[in-house]
Image (spheres, rainbow, N blue to C red):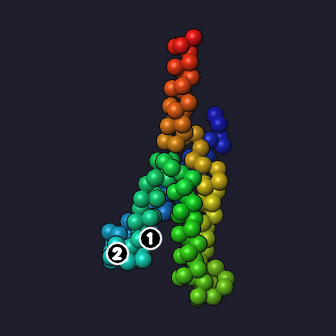
Amino acid sequence: MDVARITRAVFRIGVAALFLMHGLQKLFGFGGKPIAVASLLGVAGVLELVGGILLMLGLWTRPVAAVLALEMLSAFVMVHAPRGAVPMQNGGELPLLYALAFVFLAGNGAGRVSVDTAWRHDKVAEPRDRLRRAA
């Protein structure tokens, strides 16, 4: 049993599921009133919904995680930092924690349990199979 592979998948899927819920809340009003998609918060909701789904699947993990990290950093700067410099006082600890999680995923990828890895293995296997058949 490869504990590192399992824990990375649990981390990626767990973070993505929680992040996805923020998108559902913004766009569909789960736990509140829905926000117009044509607003800044609506765009954030779309990023959270689509990004959460892609991260759960482990699809395009590195670029998606990089975009989401930038979204969370901009949310901190635009919404939370004006309320004060300390994240525990301005309510900005959650966006910063998400940003750190996304930086980790952008740097380390989805891991073996992902669509990214399955596609990469297919692309590597095809030329290898052609070479074997040619020999």
Residue 106 at least partly seen? yes
Please, what is the three-letter code of the amino acid marked with disc 2?
A: Ala
Q: Is residue 88 left or right of residue 118?
A: right
Q: Residues within 10 Å of mark 1 (few under 14, many from 20)?
A: some
Q: Which residue is mark 1?
A: 44
Residue 38: which quarter of the image? bottom left
Q: Residue at x 61, y 55 (%)?
A: 106
Q: Nearer the viewer, residue 5 or 61?
A: 61
Please, what is the three-letter code of the amino acid marked with disc 1?
A: Ala
Query: Rounded to the nearest whole Å, what is the CA distance between mark 1 and mark 2?
Result: 10 Å
Residue 29: which quarter of the image? bottom left
Q: Residue furthest front?
A: 134
Q: Position of residue 99 (x, y in %)?
A: 60, 66
Residue 90: which quarter of the image? bottom right
Q: Residue at x 63, y 88 (%)?
A: 84
Residue 14 at least partly seen? no
Q: Which residue is mark 2?
A: 38
Q: Residue at x 67, y 83 (%)?
A: 86
Residue 93: mark in rendering: none
Dot placed on the residue nearer the N-terminal end, 1 or 2: 2
Q: Position of residue 122 (x, y in %)?
A: 50, 31
Q: Secondary structure at mark 1?
A: helix
Q: Residue at x 52, y 32 (%)?
A: 123
Q: Is residue 94 left or right of residue 29?
A: right
Q: Nearer the viewer, residue 27 or 44?
A: 44
